[in-house]
Image (tube, rainbow, N blue to C red):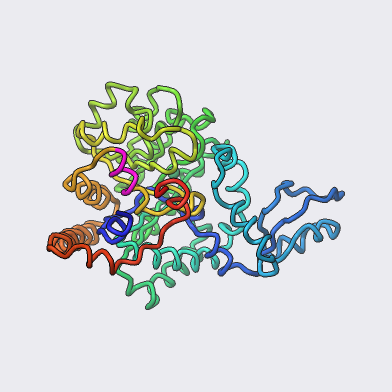
């Protein structure tokens, strides 16, 4: 079954945080010169966060007080045991790890890698090749290029032969951190950035823990209205309703102008918003593995995904932070099919939605939809023959560690 879903055409992954979507092995290959904090000795003048397995660039390391240098070890110098501990420290792989480990610990371990724009380009390249092997046609990922120069270098890298020839396209969303004191200015800056980089940056998002109410949606109502007076055609996908309690988060997020809702897990608690979402203009980006590992659902059988799907709300499946979960898009399809008894027509509709509701420009979107339909037809023909077992036997799925831990056994 895993091989079948690995081989199946999958449309797009459109709820995706770039810096949290790399395999630790890929990070190891790309920044072997970075150092990892292995110990926590008491050292005067050390003002960095006392966080084991935090990674720092050579420049950051040399700026740290000398007495703390002994705590750090170059990534390429880790022995087997240390490397395994470091990999584990970058992933949610233990039952007791959850929301706090993710937001307050793991994200900070990766901060310096995310700031290194050269590293990000090469990590993106590796990730796209991996997604292409998994039959994903499109990734729409949340990533802020810190400068125009960084955006231009990224554009150049994507045009190089090894990436331009891949059967996968990538577009970006800018992302504001909603609970920050300066989040309104950040939204305004990002609008301007998107406007100047419309060929690649196709949308804008707001992320960050919603249980921190400093980032509530209505705080931004005037900001988005102001931006719409100035700019046309900047697409919005906004995290909404990724909270435990019932509430109006999704309705308020729609009021900001969001065309797509990230997670929408508590949409089910708001009857008006449910009826509104049924009109088909807006899609919910569902992330099953993420919702379970971040403890929004201890049992995914209680997830509202099948209700949204069969009530007529457009949905698609996404990975959110596949590096930290050590998962892939195959896992999402496999889980959904097992848990909610999806029909083939439903599985295909989910894939189609992920392209139809993407922010890809019209010409690319049409090309992706055409390729998807053709790939589905070819796939159906291959598996509908009497000898589907020998077809399946030729597939070599790359089983994720999350699937090994939590889906297959
Ligand atoms: Zn997200």
Look at the image and say whether residue 334 sits in the magenta stretch.
Answer: yes
Instruction: Please state the total of marks drawn on the protein image.
Output: 0
Residue 407 percent across, percent down from the top left: 40, 47
Q: Is residue 202 left or right of residue 31?
A: left
Going 22% across and 63% down the picture, which residue do you hit?
Answer: 389
Q: Is residue 407 above or below residue 372?
A: above
Going 16% across and 65% down the picture, which residue do you hit?
Answer: 387
Q: Is residue 360 left or right of residue 287?
A: left
Residue 364 image-quadrant placement: bottom left
Which of the pair 359/348 is nearer the observer?
348
Q: Is residue 294 left or right of residue 282?
A: right
Residue 367 image-quadrant placement: bottom left
Residue 373 percent across, percent down from the top left: 16, 59
Q: Is residue 392 left or right of residue 78?
A: left
Residue 209 percent across, percent down from the top left: 51, 36
Q: Is residue 81 above or below residue 300?
A: below
Going 26% across and 58% down the picture, which residue do you hit?
Answer: 8
Which of the pair 75/369 is nearer the observer?
75
Look at the image and say whether residue 137 sits in the magenta stretch.
Answer: no
Principal secondary structure, stretch drawn in magenta: helix
Viewport quadrant of the N terminus: bottom left
Report the span colored magenta: 333-339
Residue 250 percent across, percent down from the top left: 36, 30
Which of the pair 183/229 is nearer the observer?
183
């Amino acid at each position: 079954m895993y091989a079948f879903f690995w081989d199946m055409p999958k449309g797009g992954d459109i709820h995706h945080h770039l810096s949290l979507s790399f395999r630790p092995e890929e990070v190891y290959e790309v920044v072997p010169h970075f150092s990892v904090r292995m110990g926590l000795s008491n050292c005067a003048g050390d003002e960095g966060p006392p966080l084991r397995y935090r990674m720092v660039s050579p420049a950051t390391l040399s700026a740290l007080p000398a007495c703390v240098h002994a705590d750090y070890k170059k990534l390429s110098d880790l022995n087997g045991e240390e490397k395994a501990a470091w990999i584990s420290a970058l992933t949610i792989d233990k039952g007791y790890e959850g929301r706090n480990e993710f937001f307050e610990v793991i994200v900070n371990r990766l901060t310096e890698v995310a700031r290194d724009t050269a590293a990000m380009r090469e990590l993106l390249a590796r990730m796209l090749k991996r997604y292409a092997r998994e039959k994903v046609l499109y990734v729409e990922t949340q990533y802020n290029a810190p400068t125009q120069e960084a955006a231009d270098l990224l554009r150049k890298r994507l045009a190089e032969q090894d990436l331009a020839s891949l059967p996968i396209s990538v577009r970006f969303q800018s992302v504001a951190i909603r609970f920050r004191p300066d989040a309104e200015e950040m939204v305004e800056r990002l609008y301007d950035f998107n406007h100047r980089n419309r060929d690649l940056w196709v949308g804008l998002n707001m992320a960050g823990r919603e249980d921190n109410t400093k980032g509530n949606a209505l705080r931004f109502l005037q900001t988005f209205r102001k931006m719409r007076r100035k700019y046309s055609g900047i697409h919005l996908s906004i995290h909404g309703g990724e909270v435990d309690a019932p509430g109006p988060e999704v309705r308020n997020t729609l009021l900001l102008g969001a065309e797509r809702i990230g997670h929408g897990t508590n949409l089910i608690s708001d009857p008006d918003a449910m009826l509104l979402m049924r009109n088909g203009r807006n899609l919910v980006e569902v992330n099953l593995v993420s919702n379970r590992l971040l403890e929004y659902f201890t049992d995914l059988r209680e997830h509202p995904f099948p209700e949204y799907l069969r009530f007529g709300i457009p949905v698609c499946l996404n990975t959110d932070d596949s590096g930290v979960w050590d998962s892939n898009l195959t896992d999402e399809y496999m889980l959904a099919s097992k848990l909610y008894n999806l029909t083939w027509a439903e599985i295909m509709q989910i894939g189609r939605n992920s392209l139809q509701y993407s922010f890809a420009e019209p010409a690319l979107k049409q090309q992706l939809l055409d390729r998807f339909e053709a790939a589905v037809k070819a796939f159906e023909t291959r598996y509908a023959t009497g000898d589907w077992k020998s077809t399946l036997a030729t597939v070599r799925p790359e089983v994720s560690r999350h699937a090994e831990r939590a889906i297959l056994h």
